[in-house]
Amino acid sequence: MGQIFSLTAKEARKIMDAAVQTLETQFIAASVCLVNRDGTIIVSLMMDGVRPHTANVARLKAQQSALTGKSTLDIRDEIAAGKKTAEILGIPANELICWAGGMPIYDKEGNLLGGIGVSEPGEMTEEMVAENAVCKAGFDVKK
């Protein structure tokens, strides 16, 4: 029988710490959310000074990446190119986030563990923070 892999609380905290360290080093505030493989929130943080809605955006980004195994930027590009639809990807249309900042989290063996979402400082910064945090903590963002 197959085995289901998932991000643990300890692993999520390690990734969150790396994200916060990157943000604080750059004097940027953001909302960050980490979810396990089935999209359940493990840890979520709203840094001081961020807009309230960013926590929800970070959650949606993390859940989309965990569900699809793709970054939210890749999801946006596939939909824009007409290659996929939100429905085909299993994302409810009212929850689709077409902004960068969501990344899947894989272990070194290529098993999808969950996702991270970063929201507030701007798309490319969010993307960089998410990817750097995952990699700095010893995980991968691609299979």
Image (cartoon, rainbow, N blue to C red):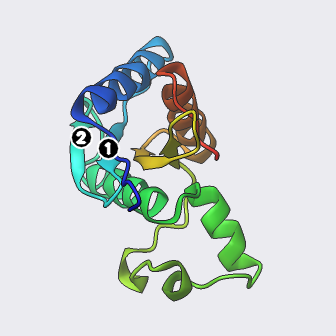
The part of the image, by quadrant, that contains residue 34 is top left
Most foreground residue, 31 or 28: 31
Q: Residue furthest right?
A: 81
* Relative horizontal placement of residue 102, taking residue 8 as reference (left or right): right
Q: Quadrant of residue 98?
A: bottom right
Q: Secondary structure at mark 1?
A: strand
Please say if 72 is above or below 96.
above
Q: Secondary structure at mark 2?
A: strand
As drawn, is 72 to the left or to the right of 33? right
The amino acid sitting under disc 1 is Cys
| Residue at (29% x, 46% y) in the render | 51
Decide: few, some or many residues near mark 1? Use Cα within 10 Å; few <14, some 14-19, many ≥20: many
Can you identify the residue that label 1 sits on? 33
Residue at 54% x, 58% y: name it.
Answer: 69
Q: Is residue 57 left or right of residue 100?
A: left
Whether residues under marks 1 and 2 lie with C-beta atoms below 8 angstroms apart, the answer is: yes
Decide which of 70, 59 is in the foreground and name it. 70
**Residue 21 percent coordinates (x, y):** 41, 15
Q: Residues within 10 Å of mark 2 (few under 14, many from 20)?
A: many
Task: List x then y, in percent, for residue 64.
Answer: 44, 63
Rounded to the nearest angstrom, the CA distance separating label 1 from label 2 is: 4 Å
Q: Earlier in the sequence, mark 1 or mark 2?
A: 1
Residue 18 vs 121, above or below: the answer is above
Q: Residue at x 58, y 58 (%)?
A: 70
Tell which of 48 and 20 is nearer to you.
Answer: 20
* Quarter occupied by the N terminus: bottom left
Residue sitting at 59 percent across and 85 percent down? 85
User: Can you give x and y, in whole percent of width and height, for residue 82 in the image?
Assistant: 74, 85
According to the image, label 2 marks what residue? Answer: 44
Q: Amino acid at mark 2?
A: Ser
